[in-house]
Amino acid sequence: MFAKSISSLVFWPVGLVGLLLFVLVLRLAYNVSLHPLRKFPGPKSWAASRIPWIWSNTHGRLHRDLLALHKKYGSVVRIAPNELSYTTGSSWRTIHGHRPVEMSKDLRGAGLLPTFKNTDSIVTAPRQDHARMRRTVAHAFSDKALREQEDIVQGYIDQLISRLTDKHTEGPQDLVRWYNYTTFDIMGDLSFGEPFGCLQEGQYHEWVSMIFNGVKLYPWIQAAVYYGLTPLRALFAPKKLMEAKEQADRNAYSKLDRRLARKDLERKDFMTYILRHNDDRGMSMPEIQETAVVLIIAGSETTATFLSGFTYHTLRNSIVYRRLVREIRTRFARYEDISILATQDIKYLNAVIEEAFRIYPPSPSAFPRVVPGQGEKIDGQWVAGNTTVGINQWAANHDPKNFYRPDDFLPERWMPADLYDSHDVPAEMFAHDDRGVVQPFSFGPRACLGKNIAYAEMRVIICKLLWSFDLELAANSNNDHWADGQETYILWEKAALWVNLRPVQR
């Protein structure tokens, strides 16, 4: 009898494990052979389980792996049991464009994460709430607001030039850091009414450091959300980092509270417009708090990342660099003439900017959506409802089906005919480029509100920097391969970009 009881005790755990394995095998087989997405091309291992996607994502190589898959399988690839990746301009319009029924953002672990609070931000809110918030926030990003905010923006850009003038004699400068100092100070001041002090101190504010230090955790939290382990997400993060994030958020909310208490502020910032237009149908205070934090990160890190990629690719291409410098220094006789308005129509600069967006998109990842209802057609193929769909920007921008010589930095791809000269790649070589693929600010009703201010910052920083200094990639670093092998964790994990600066003698 005792032996029989022991056998039973041993059998049940073994039997349970066996049953679970059997169910798992059935699930994997279903995903590969019977799932509604079974006819879409892609590797069987990725179709069977989310694990290959998670492994690639947590190792920072998802953008490169997806490009390889698209090169092998085509413009649509099944990259998880319930997810499709696209690389066409038409898919941008279908997935992200204006539609009667929105494809909602997927907050289930494939892209953006929820706020994990009772309040949404403008980027995570469902359609009706997003429209309500956007109506309020949009006033802060209007052309009128940009004109009224120019003095603030210009002040920090001038501070950047001044600091680099002081520092250039010390040797090469890491422009990745200096660009981040500048953009975070600008957005901190516009959002909270006070800067982070990065430019003045020559170092990152603790809140900014927290963002960079915690970026590698993002894919692990995505995995926790995907598998329904959201309550356990703290296990993925070191306790000190979680505490630092909570403290940094409290500091950010305190900054916002101080700004809201200043009723007599003469100059105009984001809160001026948000509060002025915030009626009963506007935003709650928690929504304003969450959105202010999002605006700072979205408006700072991505702009600094763009400027870093722009600088790297421009300095590696001497013909592009010399032509751009000539255009800027010919256009502006005086430093004081460089304004937001005056930099808008510099044709070659704009072409170089667009090519930099293509070859090094500041947001390289997809921000996937969910197909509504019973499903619909995307690029001529029926996709079942509840499927996750998205466009990985780096993979799409580097797909040879979309662009001629996709890995080469060719600003003439975007140039008007009157700028062409004998050294440029002939325009007809770009005739089949799918320019609609390049959407650095996203597309449709949820496209980035900060597009105008981002372009303004970029153009003025570039013009003032190249007007003031001769730049050269430092020889004593890995600058020749700065962009090669960079990892992505929603954001790029960038190495230092060491640049020699020599003030222009006039």
Image (cartoon, grey):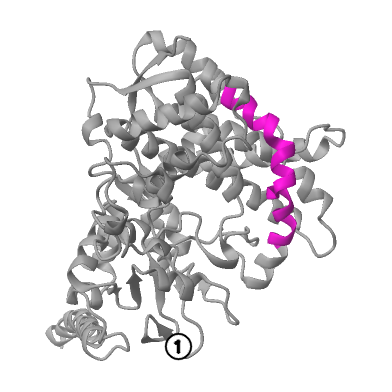
Q: Position of residue 479 (x, y in %)?
A: 25, 30
Q: Is residue 7 left or right of residue 417?
A: left
Residue 25 point in image, percent of width and height: 19, 83
Front one among 290 and 127 = 127
The residue positioned 42% from the left and 86% from the top of the image is 377
Q: Residue furthest right?
A: 264
On whether residue 145 falls in the magenta region, the answer is yes
Q: Is residue 410 above or below residue 134?
A: above
Image x and y of residue 372, in percent: 50, 83
Residue 316 vertical position relative to residue 225 in the rendered view, above or below: above
Is 496 on the left-hand or right-hand side of 447?
left
Number of numbered discs visible in the structure rendering:
1
In this picture, which residue range is highlighted in magenta? 133-158
- What's under tag 1, amino acid-wise? Gly
Residue plotted at (54% across, 15% down): 162
SS under mark 1: strand
Q: Is residue 93 magenta?
A: no
Q: Which secondary structure is most common in the magenta stretch?
A: helix
Residue nearest the viewer, comparing 270 with 409: 409
Q: Position of residue 302 (x, y in %)?
A: 47, 44
User: How many other residues sit within 10 Å of disc 1, few (<14), some (14-19) or many (≥20)?
Assistant: some
